[in-house]
Amino acid sequence: MTEFIRKRTANAKNDILSGITVALALVPEAVAFAFVAGVDPLVGLYAAFMIGLITSIFGGRPGMISGATGALAVVMVALVAKGNAMGAPSENLGLYYLFATVILMGIIQMLAGVFKLGKFVRLIPHPVMMGFVNGLAIVIFLSQLGMFKEVINGEKVWLHGEALYIMIGLVALTMTIMFGLPKLTNKLPEALIAILVVSAIAILGNIDVATVGSFIRDGGGDGLKGGLPAFQWEIFSKIPFNWKTITFIGPYALILAAIGLIESLMTLNLVDELTETRGNSNRECLAQGGANIITGLFGGMGGCAMIGQSLINIKGGGRGRLSGIVAALALLAFILFASGLIEQVPIAALVGVMFMVVIGTFAWSSFRILNKIPLSDVIVLIAVSTLTVIFDLAIAVIAGVIISALVFSWENAKRIRARKRVKDDGTKVYEIWGPLFFGSIIAFNDKFDIKNDPNHIEVDFIESRICDHSALEAIFNLVNKYEVEGKSITLKHLSGDCKELLYKSSAKFREVIEEDIDDPRYHLAEDPERFNKPLSEYKL
């Protein structure tokens, strides 16, 4: 028991300090995404608190941070606007339609976890992962450029003159501290120290800079202070639960669920690589879904994993669930008790932290390997990076997987081979090599000379596999063509699963498939356990 407690608390200091740093970085992000979605800043902050806390406790990836994200916020804009148009302006129906959508989104995500769909993240190729990381780093960088603007007469304009130089100086100071402090000591969290130092300089020096408080007020908010999240009974009184509502919120919920899961599982994979540990993708799906259901019921805008904050946490030494729990509880404490202090933190300090995250996120090695990997992988990497910046993460990843799958299919389609020989009795043998699937059917059919072949044909599949319905149809048509010519055909060395597919598709195959095969190569391929048996057991 003592050993168990020792292991659990070994990293407690790093988890706590890293969690506080993450909480500071969560504030402007959650507020900004709430503004993007067209809702009150507290809706974003409540989402960051509730989703962060629930996924930290129950999620499949300790150390990963979840909250309100920009990828989801951009989808919510149209939902909120259309919802508001369904009632009077004072009803604020868009907000309650958003809560209902987040609840449905959570249900869909939980179903994905129940049916263990999280494992499909393994199908994402490495070039897609690198493209995702690079694209996301660029997106984070571009999102921070908006902090270099100020509001004048209701319009945002770029900083200039002294204000710009001060902003750049404080950002550079933050980055310098974060870069240099680890070289002096690893016992202090560089991001938190950098934020505290820059905040102290700005406050004590009475420097006129944009702060968290001014950022909220410029966006139309009243401030950071709020109370505990309250159960939203108005969802059930203001939103009619009928088919019309389902058809309205359903597509949004499905899109949000897909984006949330893809972003979360991709972030989970990235944290796995950074920490050299393995998370549980299906458990993460369940936790994300449950968190979004609770968040919708208690007035949050929904969310998923946040790669920027997750990387801040990992870089700060946060590895356990405690780091995410501390981040969520610290964020709530800021809202309840320390809003005045947090509102004084300069935006420049947080921008500096995020710029360091960008530098640490971008896969700089991708430049070095561009001329060492296949051209198709280079295209996928660049395409995913570009699409992530232009559209969003979900579209980029799906497009990258589709391109990779098409390239894989094309390359395998070219690998179908047929070695031909004639036995002493005049039987012609076609030895097939390579996978037989939709992409290789044409090449497979071209191997046979039905008109000029002898009367007896054998097709040997010991080095091939039947993969799909197209392959079944190709073999069925081949058998028919030989029979029409009055010639016999035998299929040999089919694996058990291939024979099962053929037998299910047509009874005709029972007449042409040879079952009794005296060939040790075939038995070794069919039953790997035979490798462990003595040679005397083989039928030679």
Image (cartoon, grey):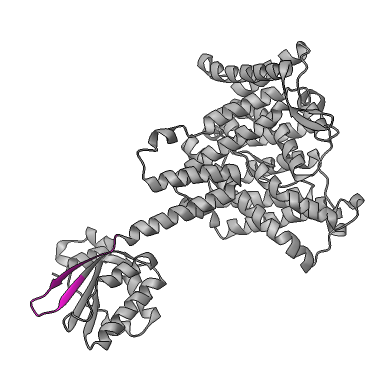
Image-quadrant location for residue 499: bottom left
Instruction: Looking at this view, name the residue that lies furthest to the top.
Output: 205
- Which x, y percent locates residue 328? 70, 36
Asked where in the image residue 71 lies, by quadrant, the reply is top right
User: Can you say whether 246 is above or below 349 in the image?
Assistant: below
Question: Is residue 224 visible to the viewer in this orientation of the structure?
Answer: no
Which quadrant: the N terminus?
Answer: top right
Q: In this image, 441 relative to 173: left or right?
A: left
* Vertical placement of residue 201 versus 313, above or below: above
Position of residue 184 relative to residue 268, above or below, is: above
Answer whether residue 416 is magenta in the image.
yes
Tell me where residue 28 appears, x and y as whole percent.
72, 32
Q: Nearer the viewer, residue 493 or 132?
A: 132
Residue at 73%, 65% in the rendered image: 247
Residue range highlighted in magenta? 415-430
**Does residue 336 show up magenta in the picture?**
no
Is residue 4 left or right of 198 when viewed as pictured? left
Residue 503 pos. (x, y %): 36, 79
Locate the C terminus by quadrant: bottom left
Task: Specify whether residue 150 is in view.
Answer: yes
Q: Going 80% across and 27% down the picture, which residue do you hit?
A: 214
Residue 94, position as x, y percentages in the image: 82, 52
